[in-house]
Image (cartoon, rainbow, N blue to C red):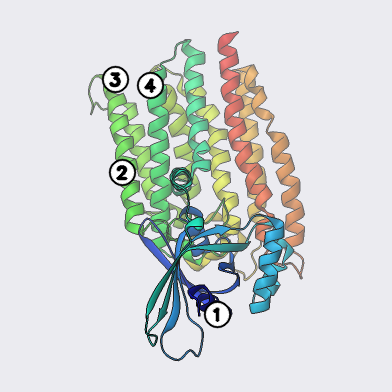
Amino acid sequence: MELKEKILDLLHRSTFLTLGTSVAGNPSVANVYFANEGLDIFFFTFNPTRKAMQINFNPHVQCVIRPENEDGIKELQIDGIATKITDDVEKQKAKQSILKVTKAFEEYMNDDFLIENDVVGYYKISPVTIKYVDFYAEKQFEWLELSENKLSFFNELFGSVINKIKYLLLIIRAPFLTATIAPILLGSSIAYWQFSAFNWSIFWLTLLGGIFAHCGTNMINDYFDHVSRNDETNKLFSPFNGGSRTIQAGLMNPVTVLLFSVMFFIGTILIGLKLNYDINEAYFALSPLMYLGIVGILLGIMYTGFLRLAYNGFGDLAVFLGFGPVMVYGAGYIQNQSIDLSTTLLFSIPIGIFIALVLFINCFQDYNADKATNKNSWVVRLAGPHEKANYRRPFVVWQYSMIIGFIFILIGAISINPITIIGLLPAFLFYFGLKKGRAWLLEWEKEDANIQQLPYELLIVNVSTIGTHFLTGILLTMGFLISAWI
């Protein structure tokens, strides 16, 4: 019998394989049911699983296939390239093939909600090398090379670069860096409006230092939420809550996450010392910048680390201070040490409120995990210890806190800078989120509510809150810039 025929014989007589994936030295192994079409192998899994996440960043996989009830040691050891199937026709073909092997996952495969939210995934393994093992044969090891499945040098190189970029953006939670960009832009624009002067080198250093501090905060939060088992307990994670999933997906080990966090904080400190020297002619001069830097870093570390502010109900206040007054005033002060304190504080309040509400609304989906790990956020406190959370009270807090933020913008426009009235435009986005949130509450409170799916339906409110914060920051910045130019 030819080697290919022997391989196909083992494939046809097997129903599951052991799949090995790895990213950055973090291996993962799982048993999965599979179907094959010739030498191509198909399997089903959920896209948020560890193996699927690792394949997303490193398509090189290994797997072992051994038929059940086989006398002796006879198996296939395969090195291959795994890819997520995106073509709808190919998805259906893979689905039907897998259903012929097992119907264990049929309910999930046909779940419209899971399909719509890209939870259901079908993957294809294209073998590059197949090692046929038969210890009772005269020739115990045989290899089949499939060079046509190898990635070309260009695809390997290009894919590696793209995957590293995606990897970096994920571990630092790059989309949430808008929480740093908005207040630094606002504080810098207030300084420009007041003094008609601007130092670009100081601005870029300030922005880089703020981003480093934010990245350090995100990563140290991932570490301590892993230590507390909060992120592991969280089964309702999304792009907006439940951490970056870096540790849970095996993309980086916990110690490395902590080390990267420390490195980002060190980068922030070095930039802060350089700015302090430029302003005060001494690296360690006792100045408002030095105090603001210390406060900012401490808030980032203490959020889930030392003092565990997020676990004791003070996390929202820490976020409000760190991403509101501290960053807005700090960015303005670095541009000009005579910047008006009352103006920066007044306009930093809505920015601080809105970013705190981003974390606040995200805690709706985190409720069960937070409650289970004694992370007593205000959503947990307000929603109560019931089996099914009473979200009406925390939602009212979100609603009226949003309104208070817009009131501060109105006060600032009336009393200081009329053009900043444009900062009220995101109120339309808030109103959209409010309507969606109220409708969501009515669904949640029904006796037959699907409490497993409904938290994901709230994501539109999460998005509207993030959009309200960032858009407000950008529009207030534009208001001060326009005022400076006219």
Q: Residues within 10 Å of mark 3 (few under 14, many from 20)?
A: few
| Above/below status of 389 relative to 141 | above
Asked if residue 149 lies left or right of residue 297, the reply is right
On the image, the x and y values in percent for residue 437 come to: 72, 51
**Marks 2 and 3: which is nearer the front?**
2
Of the 4 image quadrants, the one containing the C terminus is top right
State yes or no: discs 2 and 3 in contact (Cβ < 8 Å).
no
Mark 1 packing: few (<14 Cα in 10 Å), some, or many (20+)? few
Measured in 3D between alpha carbons, the distance from the residue under mark 2 to the one under mark 3, in whole angstroms, is 23 Å
Q: Is residue 161 visible?
A: yes
Real-space Cα distance between discs 1 and 4?
68 Å
Q: Residues within 10 Å of mark 2 (few under 14, many from 20)?
A: some
Of the numbered discs in the image, which one, if any, rests on residue 202?
4
Instruction: Label 2, secondary structure: give it.
Output: helix
Which element is circle 4 on? helix
Q: Could you say which quadrant of the image residue 332 lies in?
A: top left
Residue drawn at the location 54% of the way across and 43% of the way down = 356
Give the image location of residue 220, x and y in percent: 38, 51
Q: Nearer the viewer, mark 1 or mark 4?
A: 1
Q: Are marks 2 and 1 in contact (CB under 8 Å)?
A: no
Residue at point 57%, 9% (across, down):
485
What residue would you read off at disc 3? 278
First in sequence: mark 2 or mark 3? Answer: 2
Q: CA distance from mark 2 to mark 1?
A: 53 Å
Front tag of 2 and 4: 2
